[in-house]
Image (cartoon, rainbow, N blue to C red):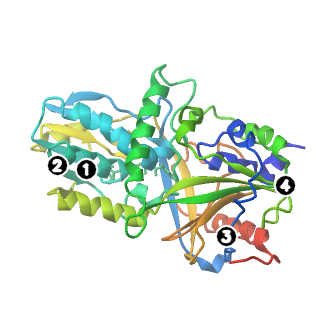
């Protein structure tokens, strides 16, 4: 069986499952009798239910996020950008490191450049550390790239290249991941469910033992993965054999994952920042020397992919990803990967995303123009899965 066939059987879902590594996943027992799959609401997978198509660029750096500091235009600039496909997931932990550096000399005021996931969380963290904070940004929600993320807990998704990171990066990553995880837990159960847990399924016709090999075949770039370091905070997965699940595939692998309802979450973070006295000003910087005009002496740089142009950081590589948004459906609160397509039922829409046949998909592509034909094709793939099947729910 060739690689393409493996992948088309749904093996890529393991990658989309974020932290869950094949060895972790496939070691799990079949499901206990008291924990069956609940009612599954079928996706109304029709291209005419696409209400928008968004494209986002993951701000990838082979060496991982930039968190060092430097003197620029007589300011202390602490960098906090380049989180690849893990920006939402790592944000609070990354903010803890950046704000720790920014507060070293206890400044009264801090400027944060950027109002995406990293900017908002850094700004809130700096406020909580006692600083008066102003965010300066070219765009704010919903126009920032962070607004166009899938919304999954994926702290080691395209975060670095295994052969390019410093030896201490894995430990730093683990610290960031744990800090973020702890903070995001405090948002679970709030009105509007900014963060919630849900079940994800990897749907495949392959038997579980072949899924591992199929997954390895999709990893060609050498991205770093550290899932085993946080196995203690990662819910176990379960395999459902034929006849024990409602899907049209042979097997279904289930794991539970945190999900960010990004629209609601961004409103909440922004409201919290403003309520604590924060200010947001629209500003664009074209050169590092432009930072000299700010009144604050300490600046946290959270410009994401924008840092490539602003700081001439050629190590920043765009990784393109497109989402077709299907109209939200009540009760559709799960996610799955089928063939190369990932689906996640969020409050603000059903996220449909093509993952490509391996992890080269979208790498070094800076084109942010939506591709309607690709969006329709992804939705049709999902339609195949549900065609002609009766579902509870
Ligand atoms: C398709 C896709 C799916 C993703 N899914 C997930 C996921 O499920 N989970 C996850 O954790 N991560 C995910 N990511 C990654 C995540 O979206 C990014 O890591 C994150 O959004 C980066 O946030 P940021 O705040 O650094 O950048 P941005 O959101 O791009 O914000 C940058 C801010 O800086 C400002 N700015 C930039 N340049 C300048 C300038 N010169 N002057 C002034 N202001 C400037 C911008 O206006 C903006 O306010 C996904 C990414 C993509 C593309």
Q: Under tag 2, what secondary structure?
A: strand
Q: Neighbour class for label 1 at 10 Å: few (<14), some, many (≥20)?
A: many
The answer to whether residue 169 is left or right of residue 358 is left
The quadrant where residue 104 appears: top left
Residue 347 in picture, x, y percent from top left: 49, 70
Q: As rendered, which of 209 and 215 lies closer to the eye?
A: 209
Q: Which residue is mark 3?
A: 376
Tag in front: 2 or 1: 1
Ligand 1 contact, mark 4 (Cβ < 8 Å)? no
At horizontal 44% and vertical 45% (from top left) the residue drawn is 181
Q: Under tag 3, what secondary structure?
A: helix
Q: Mark 1 or mark 3, which has the lower sequence index? A: 1
The quadrant where residue 138 appears: bottom left
- Residue 205 is labelled as 4
Q: Which residue is mark 1?
A: 124
Assign the N terminus to one quadrant of the image: top right
Q: CA distance from mark 1 to mark 3?
A: 39 Å
- Residue 133 is labelled as 2
At horizontal 38% and vertical 33% (from top left) the residue drawn is 66
At horizontal 43% and vertical 43% (from top left) the residue drawn is 90
Residue 27 in picture, x, y percent from top left: 74, 39
Assign the C terminus to one quadrant of the image: bottom right
**On screen, 335 above or below 286?**
below
**On screen, 188 above or below 5?**
below
């Amino acid at each position: 069986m060739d690689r393409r066939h493996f992948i088309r059987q749904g093996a890529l879902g393991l990658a989309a499952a974020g932290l869950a590594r094949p060895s972790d996943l496939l070691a799990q027992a079949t499901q206990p009798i008291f924990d069956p799959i609940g009612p599954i609401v079928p996706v109304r997978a029709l291209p005419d239910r696409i209400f928008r198509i968004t494209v986002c660029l993951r701000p990838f750096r082979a060496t991982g996020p930039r968190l060092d500091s430097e003197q620029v235009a007589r300011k202390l600039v602490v960098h906090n950008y380049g989180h690849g496909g893990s920006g939402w997931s790592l944000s609070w932990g990354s903010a803890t490191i950046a704000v720790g550096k920014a507060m070293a000399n206890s400044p009264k005021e801090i400027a944060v450049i950027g109002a995406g996931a990293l900017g908002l969380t850094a700004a809130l963290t700096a406020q909580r550390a006692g600083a008066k904070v102003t965010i300066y940004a070219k765009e704010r929600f919903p126009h920032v790239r962070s607004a166009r993320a899938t919304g999954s807990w994926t702290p080691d998704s395209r975060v670095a290249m295994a052969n390019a990171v410093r030896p201490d990066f894995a430990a730093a990553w683990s610290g960031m991941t744990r800090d973020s995880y702890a903070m995001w837990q405090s948002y679970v159960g709030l009105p509007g469910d900014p963060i919630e847990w849900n079940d994800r399924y990897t749907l495949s016709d392959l038997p579980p033992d072949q899924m591992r090999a199929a997954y390895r075949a999709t990893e060609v770039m050498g991205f770093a993965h550290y899932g085993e370091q946080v196995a203690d905070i990662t819910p176990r997965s379960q395999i459902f054999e034929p006849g024990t699940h409602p899907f049209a595939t042979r097997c279904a692998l289930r794991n539970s994952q945190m999900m960010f309802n990004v629209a609601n979450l961004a409103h909440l973070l922004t409201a919290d920042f403003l309520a604590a006295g924060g200010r947001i000003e629209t500003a664009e910087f074209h050169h590092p020397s432009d930072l000299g005009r700010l009144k604050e002496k300490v600046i946290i740089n959270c410009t994401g992919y924008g840092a490539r142009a602003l700081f001439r950081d050629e190590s920043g590589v765009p990784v393109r990803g497109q989402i077709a948004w299907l109209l939200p459906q009540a009760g559709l609160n799960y996610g799955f990967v089928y063939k190369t397509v990932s689906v996640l039922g969020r409050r603000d829409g059903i996220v449909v995303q093509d993952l490509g046949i391996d992890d080269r998909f979208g790498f070094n592509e800076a084109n942010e123009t939506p591709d309607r034909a690709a969006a329709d094709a992804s939705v049709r793939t999902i339609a195949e899965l549900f065609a002609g099947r009766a579902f509870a729910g």
